[in-house]
Amino acid sequence: MGKDKKIVIMNIQVKEPALGFRRLPAGFYTVVHHSGHEWRTENKRSSVSDDVIEWRGPIPLPSDRSATIRLEVYASFEFQPMLGTGEHLRTLTTTVDQLLDCSAKHIPFTLLPKNGDIVSPCSSILVTVEQRNGESSDSSASRVIGPLCSTTETLNELEDATNHGHSALSRYRKYGGKRDLERSVAEFEQALNNCPLDHPCRAAAQSNLAMAKLIFCQVEDMIASLEIPILLYRDALAARPVGHADRPSTLVQLAAVHLARFEKQRDDVDGARVEALLHEAMGLSSTDSDENRAMSLMLQLYAGHRSSPDHANDQSCWSGSNDTES
């Protein structure tokens, strides 16, 4: 009788997925690996009021209790559709037997900060496992995944370049190495070059490159070159009309570039665009979302810069830039 039981993951809870995270993600998801297969959960938004994200199964597990299970947590930067895997945050490697034991005792797997970090995303993972009758075959909440865009060579190159770009940018944010930032820009440029004009992931490729270009312009004090990420984000926004899941985040990202330029030039046109973009985004976002919190902070920052009396000094600071063309 007992041999007919199937072992399945029924629930995964990740605590504090955004703890110490240096970017504004669209959402989070997990991938369970075993037996040469992958099961990916739903890409879910996080909220300011909830420090735990929960995914429901079932996800089947091997009957061999000594089998190795690998559970990975990722941050995504778009919803519809998703390009590449996003940023890898955490990996939990365990066995079926350990999962069953911790589940029975309701004990989470505690994850220590990575590589000397004070804090790292995902402080713990709680996995609920059940043994069910063999005839149960409900797997609607999970699926075996392959490439997220296409199986063609060109689009696999698109995904690979995107993943490499996210990895390089993550290293830059952690260690500050300029080569990683340059590598991120180069990889995202390659991804966009490999993305057909009519492909649904093109807006994601444009947004990724715009983000890396914005950081590069800020690091290098290249104010005139901020027009590049602005144009990239505008193109991405045009492909994400009202009702699109990624329109609010794109509005926030575009506003961030205009705010960066306003901080240096105090151009009222940039200021007006910051306000207009953020107010539209607020109208499309839930009040407890991380995006909404970011918008409120940006509006406060904008108001502070606008009331600052020393904008002339900021302008002179930028006048030494080597890139002076508009």
Image: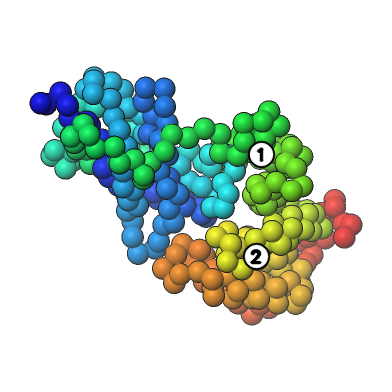
Q: Residue at x 43, y 53 (%)?
A: 44
Which image quarter holds the C terminus? bottom right
Mark 2 vs mark 1: which is more N-terminal? Answer: 1
Between marks 2 and 1, how big is the CA–CA gap?
28 Å
Residue 92, horizontal then vertical, whole percent:
34, 32
Quarter of the image holding residue 263? bottom right
Q: Residue 279: x and y, percent?
A: 59, 76
The image shows a total of numbered marks equal to 2
Name the residue furthest front.
135
Comparing marks 2 and 1, which lies closer to the viewer?
2
The quadrant where residue 233 appears? bottom right
**Rendered residue at 75%/42% (across/down):** 196
In the picture provided, is 48 more to the left or to the right than 324? left
> Mark on residue 184?
1
224 or 242, nearer to the observer: 242
- Which residue ends up furthest to the right in the rendered image? 325
> Which is nearer the eye, 173 or 93?
93
The answer to whether 194 is drawn above or below residue 70 in the figure is: below
For the question of whether residue 241 can be seen, the reply is yes
Q: Is residue 118 visible?
A: no
Q: Which amino acid does the dot numbered 1 rest on?
A: Ser
The dot on residue 241 is 2
Q: Secondary structure at mark 1?
A: helix
**Element on which disc 2 rests:** loop
